[in-house]
Every structure is written in structure tokens, then in C-alpha cells.
Amino acid sequence: MLFYLAIGLTIIANIAYHLFLKITPQNSNPVVALATTYLTAMTACILLFPFFSQEGGLMESLRKVNWTSIALGLSIVGLEMGFLIAYRAGGNISVAPVISNTAVALLIIPIGVLFFSEALTAKKVLGIALCLVGLYFINQADTPV
């Protein structure tokens, strides 16, 4: 049940994410807009910390942080800057995330297989083929991406 609640949260947050990126004012500096976003995110994390605190508190939690948090932060900047620029360039909110997320899903499959021992079944291969067909049709649409 927790898995489905978490996935529901990601779906709602992802919809809000794309909506708010799409309506971010064109005349706002993208770096300042994202810095404000991260300040808000940091504030939210500080407020959420008591609900997720572990034994040892904040200092012990900070000792357990490693390079992956920095790499994730840089990845998030790239993700958000990419979508923000794509939307400012006229990208459609109904198409840009589909293209990006489908491409990510296709490209991450070999990573899962090679580095995390995930199985590549016949059903997954069929899903890959359907994703490729979907990408083809989305890119054939009459409206600009």
C-alpha cells in the first residue's frame, strides 16, 4: 500500500512540477527562479525532517550523506533547467514530458539490466517496442513539440 501512495505522490507532484515550470514567467531569470525553488524545497525539507528523523538526529543523518546527494542535486538542476528552457522555447506541456520520460525509460533499461541485475523479460521487450512506436507517433504530430 505504501508503494502505491508513494507513486500517487510522485504523479501529483510531477503534474504540479510541469504545470508550474510551464507557467513560470518568461521574463524571470531562470537561475533566480530555480534558486527560489531550491530555497522553498530546503524549507520544506527542514519542516519535514521531524517526521522522518532517525536515531541520532540531524548530525547523525548528515554524517550518512555522501556524494550521491550532490550528484542528485546537479541532476535536478539539469532536469529543471532543461524543461524550463524547453517550455520557454515553445514546448508543449502535453508532449515534452512524454518524450523525455519515454526516452529516459528506454535508456535506463540497460542500466537496470547491467548494473542492478534486473531481468529483461519478453513483456518488457514488448513494452520497449511500444514506447518506441509511441515516440514515433508523438514526433509525427501536427503540433510543435
Image (cartoon, helix red, strand yellow):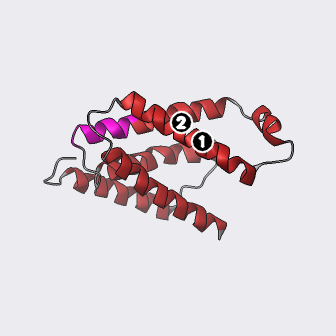
* Dot label at residue 92: none
Direction from residue 12 to residue 46 in the image, left or right: right
- Can residue 89 be found in the magenta stretch? yes
Element at badge 1?
A: helix
Which amino acid, by three-letter code, is at mark 1?
Thr
The single residue placed furthest to the right in the displayed view is 56
Identify whether 2 is placed above or below 30. below
Residue at point 40% right, 28% down? 31
First to last magenta residue range: 81-90
Which amino acid, by three-letter code, is at mark 2?
Leu
Could you say where residue 67 lies in the image, as x and y percent from the top left? Answer: 66, 29
Q: Quadrant for residue 114, please give it.
A: top right
* Dot label at residue 39: 2
Toward the viewer: 58 or 129?
58
* Residue count near mark 2 (Cα–Cα under 10 Å), binned few <14, some 14–19, many ≥20: few
Residue at point 45% right, 54% down? 14
Identify whether 117 is placed above or below 8. above
Residue at point 53% right, 41% down? 40
Magenta stretch: dominant SS? helix
Identify whether 7 is placed above or below 104. below
- Can residue 123 be found in the magenta stretch? no
* Dot label at residue 43: 1
Direction from residue 59 to residue 11 in the image, left or right: left
Q: Where's the N terminus, which quadrant?
A: bottom right
